[in-house]
Every structure is written in structure tokens, then in C-alpha cells.
Amino acid sequence: MFNRDNLRTIIYVFLLTVLLTLGLDTLNPVAIVLGVLLIIAGVISRITVSKLSGNVECRIKCPDQAEKDTRIRVEVETAKPWKLSFVRGKMSISVENLLTGENSLSEFPFKAVPARSRKCPLDITESRCGVIRVRVRNIEMEDLLARHTKTASAGASKDICIVPKISRISSEAIPEEGNICVLLDNGLSESLFLTPEQKSRTMELFCSVAGTVLSSGSSVTMIWIDTENKGLIVEKIADSDELNAKMPHILSCGFRSTEKSVAARLSDFEENEGEENIGFDSILFVTPGEARDTRLLGKLGQVSIFRA
């Protein structure tokens, strides 16, 4: 990470020697004070790094929501700057789109300025919808002489919702009333590979189909697989305002390979609900490719397939 040659040590020792020699030989108070301050800075720097443990508290400043293809300014700063006095280091920040799976890691150096927050600015431009999770992975620090280093965790994170462009879809397959389900095929077969653009396009279609139903005055039930714990998520949406409010939850679902398809999971869910039968008048099935097990949906309602 750091340049560990002896240059910094040589410069430090040279300056300290010059200041103390000048101060003691000429009794120059300015040189003596500067020399003492240089010694104190080195000692504090070493102690600060050696005693560093646990988490370094950080704050992430960024908007909660943004549109595609716009510049998003993210600023990360340490919350208690006095704890990092006279140390140098770098901050590792990851940026991940939870929907598409794209991620990157950036490193930002900061200097040894006592009693001031270390601020790391980061500009993000995202061309696909989803939830962007900005996370401070860790902070690596070294003392002024680059002789002692330590890494601390940070754990700070914040999400930015990149909203899809919801457009009204003209299709006779979209009913204007009834008990309507919009189903997302995000549990993929192992043989199906989707690019980030395909994932984004499928999600935009999913939200647009739901938005079209809501624009007619009907409510809608949106269903997808939670790809983290493999469970089925069922969200009943009353209107467009509720759809917008739940957009961060919807856009973080992800697309991953699952042994059981979303159609099979919905069929099992219906069978296990007992008296609470969840049959629909219409099931609008949004899929990025050849959907699996669509025949299982026939007993739950009239099925229409929308391919992204």
C-alpha cells in the first residue's frame, strides 16, 4: 500500500536534527518549539496506530434516490477525526448494484491532518436501475514514519435507489380490474446467463407492467424470489405512491440461479397457505428468457408472459 523505503524516515530525522541543533546551539525558541512539536507528532502518530482497534466510525453522505445516467456525488468522512491525528492512510470503498451484481472497489488516501475529518469524495454514474450500496470496507493507517501500519473495519454503508423509467404498456394481456399478480422470474436456471443490461431491462419491464395495472385504478400483487434466503416475497401494492415507496425493496431483489423456479415456489406457497388461497384472476409473468414451470401457474390464474 505505502512507499516503505527510508525516505520519509530520513526526512523526519533530518528535520528533527536540524531544528534541535539550531535551537540548542543558538537558543532559538522557534526551532526548539518546532523540534519538540515534531517529536510529539511522531509519538502521537505511533501510539494512535498501535492502539487502534475495532471500528472507525464513518459517515456517508449521498442522495437516497437518483435517476439513471446522472452524476451522483458521494462523500465519506470519519466521524471522530481526533482519533486519527497525525496518521496517514487509505479508505477502501465498494460500490455494488444489488440488482445487477456489478461491483467495484476504490481506494482513497488521506493525509495526517489533526482535528479534521478525512473526507473521501466519490462520483458515481449508473446506467442501469437497481439499488447502489456504497460501503466503507476498511481503513488502513500508518504512522508518520511508515514504520507501523494497522487496518480497522468501518462497516458504514448507505443505499442509493436508481429508479427505473416506468412506462405505460399497451397490451390486451394486461387487465384493468380483478385480482392481478405481476410475477418476476428472477430465480434463474443454471444454464441461463444474464448481462447487467438484461437484468436492468427485465426489472424495468416488471415495474412497468405493475405500473400499468395501477394506472387503471386496480391494485396489484408483486411477487419475486428473495435471492439471498431463497424465500418468496409477496407485496400487495395499492397505488403508484406505494409502488414508489417500496421501490428500494423491489430493486434489491437480484437475479441468481435457484434450483426451484419462482413458478414452482408460488405453486408450493399456494398449496401450503391452507384456507388463505392466493389464486389470481390474472398472472402477468415477466421473464428475461424461457420461463420455467409456467404450467404450474395455470391452476392459480390466467397466465400471460412478458419477455424482456
Image (cartoon, helix red, strand yellow):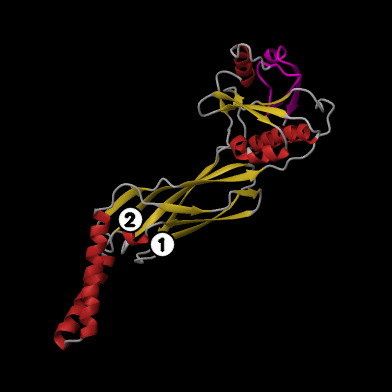
**Residue 172: numbered disc:** none
In the rendered image, the residue lying farthest to the left is 25
- Could you tell me the amino acid type at mark 1? Ser
Q: In this orientation, which residue lies closer to the viewer: 307 or 275?
A: 275
**Residue 141: numbered disc:** 2
Label 2, secondary structure: give it: strand
Q: Check the image and report above or below for 16 versus 146.
A: below
Residue identifier under label 1: 117
Q: Position of residue 303 (x, y in %)?
A: 75, 19
Residue 152 belongs to the span the image colors magenta: no
Residue 99: quadrant of the picture: top right
- Could you tell me the amino acid type at mark 2? Met
Q: Position of residue 116 (x, y in %)?
A: 39, 65
Q: Position of residue 66 (x, y in %)?
A: 63, 50
In this view, the mark in front (1 or 2): 1
Q: Are marks 1 and 2 in contact (CB under 8 Å)?
A: no
Label 1, secondary structure: give it: loop
Q: Check the image and report above or below for 21 versus 286.
A: below
Quadrant of the rendering where the N terminus is positioned:
bottom left
Residue at 60% of width from left, 29% of height from top?
193
What is the magenta range? 279-307
Distance of mark 1 from mark 2, alpha carbons? 15 Å
Residue at 37% of width from left, 64% of height from top?
111
Q: Check the image and report above or below for 185 versus 16.
A: above
**Sequence-first tag of 1 and 2:** 1
Q: Position of residue 160 (x, y in %)?
A: 57, 46
Residue 263: quadrant of the picture: top right
